Amino acid sequence: LKQELEAEAGQVRSKEELSAFWQKYLGKNGSIPALMKGLRDVPKEDRPAAGKTINEFKVWAEARYQELNAEIERIELEARNKSEQVDITMPGTVRPMGSLHPITLVKNQIIDVFSGMGFEIYEGPEIEDDDHNFTRLNVPKNHPARDMQDTFYVAEDIVLRTQTSGGQIRVMDREKPPIKVLVPGRVFRSDSDATHSPMFHQMEGLVVDKGITLCDLQGMLDKFVQALFGPEVKTRLRPSYFPFTEPSVEVDVSCFECGGKGCPLCKHTGWIEVLGAGVVHHSVLENCGIDPNVYSGFAFGIGIERIAMLKYGINNIGLMFENDLRFLKQFND
Ligand code: PHE
């Protein structure tokens, strides 16, 4: 039996086979317990010796079983390690990475600069009433200034906002000075060519407090253009007209391409127009219940597409809305 058991032990390769081996020899109905029971039929004088032999055999068989058990566990562990092995020299799978849209990049940069100066963000509605988009901004009905922006009407007195300036009114209705706020958003005008799109993005800025002047405006805009176009650039204010600011200015930045010497980008003038701004008109303050004899403010409106086109050298505004990946992939700074 010992030989048979030894031979069979040599065949055991798995947990299942090992368990069958236990059943066959050491289990309740196995051969070794059967031997024990057989002792009854052994003549009394031979029983102690036979018992001793069987017992030794049982101890040996059990030890053999433990040995096999350890051996199988080792083999299984080895197999598992092998199957789960990772080859760290294999090349990784490259996952395609998206990038931010140039409009989002510029918008974030502008917000970064001004939130550093303490500006908060407010977003108004894209569908706006005539009151907020025009009338309370000092553009009454039938005023010629309405023609400055070709308006999409949604209903009588309801428009797709043509400018984020309506956000000025909404902010001043809700909050009293000191006010320092940015109003980013989409605006709509019936206009379309290489530099105009019927939908584009603006960033309104509004500051209202005691003693605010045009100098404060220029100081903040200097910081803004320097952050976007480089530490060397300067601003220049030119007189302009907007119904809701007085005085109104057009803000130019010194050409960051040629350093002001003259090149095709600045049309050889050394200056590039970047935004409109001005001192908030006293009527606008009054329209929002703010006393213009106590408070003053400035406002500016930045065209985000325009800044993005200048900064990244994009010559057609349409490229920004086509979602061509070959175009979009270039902006991952
Ligand atoms: N709303 C003006 C425009 O769209 C820009 C502007 C904003 C001008 C604030 C002055 C002050 O052209």
Image (spheres, rainbow, N blue to C red):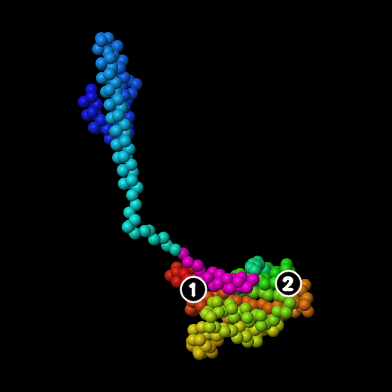
Q: Is residue 81 above or below residue 227?
A: above
Q: Which residue is mark 2?
A: 177
Give the secondary structure at mark 2.
loop
Judging by the rendered image, the residue that carries numbered circle 1 is 319
Q: Amino acid at mark 2?
A: Pro
* Foreground tag (1 vs 2): 2
Q: Name the disc covering residue 294, or none.
A: none
Q: Please say whether residue 174 is one of the residues in the magenta stretch.
A: no
Label 1 or label 2, whichever comes before in sequence order: 2
Residue at 31% x, 15% y is 37
- Residue at 28% x, 14% y is 48
Compared across the picture, whether 65 is left or right of 106 comes to left
Tell me if residue 115 can be seen: yes
The N terminus - image quarter: top left
**Residue found farthest to the top:** 44
Which one is nearer the viewer's eye here, 315 or 53?
A: 53
What secondary structure is the stretch in magenta mostly built from?
Answer: helix
- Asked whether 119 or 142 is in front, the reply is 119
In reply to whether residue 104 is colored magenta, the answer given is yes
* Mark 2 neighbour class, 10 Å CA radius: few under 14, some 14 to 19, many 20 or more: some
Q: Residue at x 70, y 77 (%)?
A: 297
Amino acid at dot 1: Leu
Magenta segment, which residues?
Answer: 98-119
107 vs 83, left or right, is right
Determine the CA span between mark 1 and mark 2: 41 Å
Give coordinates of residue 317: x percent, y percent: 52, 75
Of residues 136 and 220, the one nearer the viewer is: 220
